[in-house]
Amino acid sequence: MRDTLVLNASFEPLSTVTLNRAVVLVLTDKAVVEQEHPRLRMRAAAVELPVPRVIRLCRYVRVPFRRQAPWSRRGVLVRDQHRCAYCGRRATTVDHVVPRAQGGGDTWLNTVASCAEDNHRKADRTPEQAGMPLLHQPFVPSPAEAMLLGLRNAERVLLPEWLAAGGAPVAGAGGVATAAA
């Protein structure tokens, strides 16, 4: 089932929902379709509407401020795009840069995606001790970045440019910012 990105009334990413939930939000006038899937329509007895890819809530929803996304193994794999930080191949596990045996913890800055072979080869050593330099440094994604990274790559590529870049629409280039279909 397709995931639909939900934006707050202020165009900030909030979450992803199932296609059915997105349609219900649109039909109950709680959200509007900002971007739709080209050539795909949903039809019922008395209504026809585009299949939503991105919807925006009509009313602003206040969300508690969160400085960073909560850490998770899945989040690390998604952040690193399932690419091994040591060799660049497909990653299936999470490796601790500073091993837990040496006091390293489950944090964004101490974990990277890794293929099983490199994870096993590195064992309980740091990358320097194992002679395995990182191809990229781990980073802490913002909650919005983490959510956008969680979308399937095919869905993320099709997002409007201002949203995929993590920014907000610029109100001044033609007034209202809307997404192209």
Image: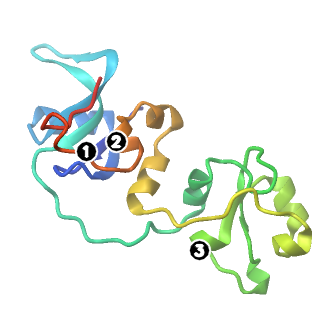
SS for tag 3?
Answer: loop
Which residue is labeled 3 in the image? Answer: 107
Residue 35 coordinates in the image, percent (x, y) = 28, 30
**Label at residue 91:** none
Residue plotted at (27% across, 16% down) = 41
Residue type (three-letter) at the residue carrying disc 1:
Pro
Give the mark nearer the N terminus: 3 vs 2. Answer: 3
Residue 40 coordinates in the image, percent (x, y) = 32, 16
Residue 167 coordinates in the image, percent (x, y) = 34, 50
User: Is residue 30 depicted above or below 70 in this figure?
Assistant: above
SS for tag 1?
Answer: loop
Query: Which residue occupies the extreme bottom position in the image?
Result: 103
Say which quadrant the N terminus sits in. Answer: top left
- Quarter residue 100 falls in: bottom right
Residues under labels 3 and 2: Cα distance?
29 Å
Residue type (three-letter) at the residue carrying disc 2:
Trp
**Label at residue 169:** 1
Residue 12 coordinates in the image, percent (x, y) = 27, 52
